[in-house]
Amino acid sequence: MDRLVDACPECDSPEFYGIVGSPVGDAGTDHDYRCRQCGEAFDEPAHREAKADSGGSDMTRRLERMDPDDLGGEA
Ligand SMILES: [Zn+2]
């Protein structure tokens, strides 16, 4: 369960985009990525463990909410 996700090294947000070679990318930075959340530009995204508490993924939440009644489907 030690899945790593890429994240902004500044604010840990997984919401960032690559600006390498992008025609609409930032001309004012040499970095490869820019964070959507804090605007930080960086060359290498940080790696952190994928956790459900960041709000980035609702998969875990969805599983927890899954009800036995929903799986039965017996009417
Ligand atoms: Zn950030």
Image (tube, helix red, strand yellow):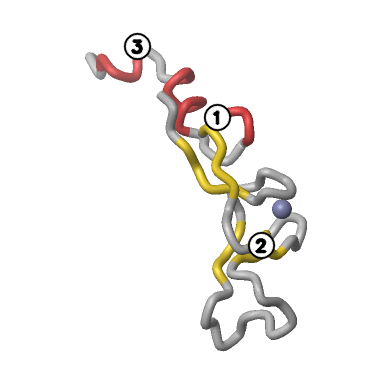
Reading the chain from its start, which is encountered first: label 3 or label 2? 2
Q: Quadrant of the C terminus?
A: top left
Q: Where is residue 52 in the image (x, y as percent from the top left)?
A: 55, 29
Q: Name the residue under label 1.
A: 51
Q: Residue 13, relative to residue 60: is it above or below? A: below
Going by the numbered disc 2, the residue's amino acid type is Phe
Compared with 63, 11 (above or below) is below
Find out if the beta carbon at label 3 lies less than 8 Å from the nearest ligand 1 atom.
Answer: no
Above or below residue 17? Residue 62 is above
According to the picture, the residue beneath numbered tag 2 turns out to be 42
Disc 3 to disc 2: CB gap under 8 Å: no
Asked which secondary structure carries label 1, the reply is loop
Q: Which amino acid does label 3 sit on?
A: Pro
Q: At 67% from the left edge and 60% from the top edge, which residue is drawn? A: 35
Q: Badge 1 local density, few (<14 within 10 Å), some, or many (20+)?
A: some
Residue drawn at x 40%, y 24% as measured from the top left: 1
